[in-house]
Image (cartoon, rainbow, N blue to C red):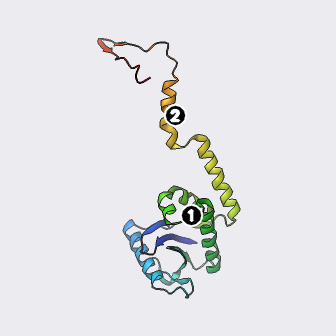
Amino acid sequence: MIQAIMVFNNHGKPRLVRFYQRFPEEIQQQIVRETFHLVLKRDDNICNFLEGGSLIGGSDYKLIYRHYATLYFVFCVDSSESELGILDLIQVFVETLDKCFENVCELDLIFHMDKVHYILQEVVMGGMVLETNMNEIVAQIEAQNRLEKSEGGLSAAPARAVSAVKNINLPEIPRNINIGDLNIKVPNLSPFV
């Protein structure tokens, strides 16, 4: 089972952190730091598997990682997972990000965090691998994008609200509102309508 997925840059700044096992936030930050230091001190020509750090379970867990340009993609898994299978899963995840963002870079992970999490959830959920077929993953993401566009998304909500107010079919704007003993005069709103 996958215990954690971490993506960080060459300087150790986390760009994506997803734990599938409950840890307090302070311990999670220590795990990310320890994992970064374990992975950073390895040469590029050494294999991409190593024992997990002391905080995440030591020899019971393995860290499997790939280094792409300025980003490290690290999966922490238990002993039941295949190292080569996880390396292939990392490749599928990165290629899917690349297809969705057209040459993915670190800034895509920063500015489109919601979409990156959605892509990750199409691949892994609850620490279990859901899908490894990149075409199927991309098809689901495109379907989600179409749905968001058809609904207008959250960014279009203010424009829809203004449009709805303008289209209210009132025969005349009320000038005086009387509620019991309370009498309210409504100013002329013609410049706003």
Q: Nearer the viewer, residue 19 or 93?
A: 93
Q: Nearer the viewer, residue 138 or 104?
A: 104
Dot 1 lies on which element?
Answer: loop
Quadrant of residue 62 within the rendered picture: bottom right
Q: On screen, 150 above or below 136? A: above
Residue drawn at x 63%, y 67% as measured from the top left: 95
Quadrant of residue 27 within the rendered picture: bottom left
Residue drawn at x 62%, y 50% as measured from the top left: 144
Q: On screen, 176 above or below 166? A: above
For label 1, the crowd category at 10 Å Cα-Cα, with few meaning under 14, some 14 to 19 and many 20 or more, is some
Q: Which label's residue is closer to the chain start, 2 or 1? A: 1
* Image-based side of 137 in relation to 10, left or right: right
Which residue carries the number 2 mark?
160
Relative image position of residue 177 (x, y in whole percent): 36, 13
Dot 2 lies on which element?
Answer: helix
Relative image position of residue 35 (x, y in whole percent): 45, 77
Query: Which corner quadrant holds the N terminus?
Result: bottom right
Q: On screen, 62 above or below 1? A: below
Residue drawn at x 51%, y 28% as measured from the top left: 164
Which residue carries the number 1 mark?
126
* Image-based side of 177 in relation to 111, left or right: left
Amino acid under disc 2: Arg
Query: Which corner quadrant holds the C terminus?
Result: top left
For label 2, the crowd category at 10 Å Cα-Cα, with few meaning under 14, some 14 to 19 and many 20 or more, is few
The Cα atoms of the two marked residues, 2 and 1, are separated by 37 Å
Relative image position of residue 189 (x, y in whole percent): 39, 20
Relative image position of residue 178 (x, y in whole percent): 35, 12
Q: Residue furthest front?
A: 191
